[in-house]
Image (spheres, rainbow, N blue to C red):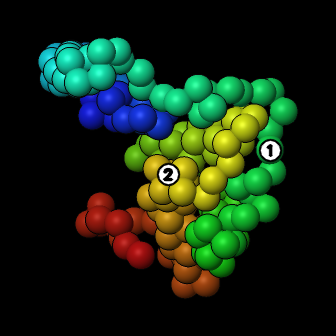
Amino acid sequence: MALTFGSRYPIALQAVTIFIVECIIRKNLNFVTRTILAATPVIAVIILILYLKNGMFETALVRDTQLSIWLSPFYLMNSINIWGYAFFLVPIAFLFPRTYQERYNYTFIAWFIVSLIFWSANTVNYQARFVIQYTPAVYFLTILAIENIMRINLGLSGRDKGTGVRSI
């Protein structure tokens, strides 16, 4: 999370989103404290290095932070060109109740939704290269959709009886 802070692209928002969701899921004050204590010196070093090198600190280009409440359909219209046909499975993942039963999935759901909204709200700069930042979330949701479809076809309940181990 701290390393994204120094990026020239505004991906710190995505890292903070993941951090907040993980804090809510884990409900562990020790996790929050350790993360903040570890991130603070890294952020300070990044700011110091960039300030010494450039004489100023700037985390994002101005054109990447001009946002509007009107979302652009650019990333949805180009989703097949960007992620391939696998993107058709992402909305399907949201249809299954099992997607919302496992707390681990919420990190990827939030990562995908916040990133897609943020980049679609950008008023000036639409480039397919920005989606690399949340491509792991897209493919996780794709795999989750495939797993849910397989469970329906195979009639699996989610956990093997007696073992407590997840099955695919």
Q: Earlier in the sequence, mark 1 or mark 2?
A: 1
The amino acid marked with disc number 1 is: Ser
Q: Judge by depth and name the residue closer to the eye, 20 or 47.
A: 47
Name the residue: 46% across, 50% down. 133
Question: How many residues crowd mark 1 within 10 Å: few (<14), some (14–19), many (20+)?
Answer: some
Instruction: Tell me the quarter of the image containing the N terminus.
Output: top left
The amino acid marked with disc number 2 is: Tyr
Q: Which residue is mark 2?
A: 134
Please state the horizontal and vertical placement of residue 36, each as a whole percent of the image: 24, 18
Spot the residue most to the right.
70
Residue 168 shows in the view: yes
Residue 46 found in image quarter = top left
Please state the horizontal and vertical placement of residue 22, each as a whole percent of the image: 37, 33
- Check the image and report above or below for 47 versus 147: above
Please state the horizontal and vertical placement of residue 116, each as a whole percent of the image: 64, 45
Please state the horizontal and vertical placement of residue 65, each as a whole percent of the image: 61, 27
Residue 101 shows in the view: no
Mark 1, secondary structure of its residue: loop
Total labels: the figure holds 2
Q: Which residue is mark 1?
A: 72
- Check the image and report above or below for 47 versus 157: above
Residue 8 found in image quarter = top left
- Check the image and report above or below for 141 versus 25: below
Name the residue: 80% across, 44% down. 72
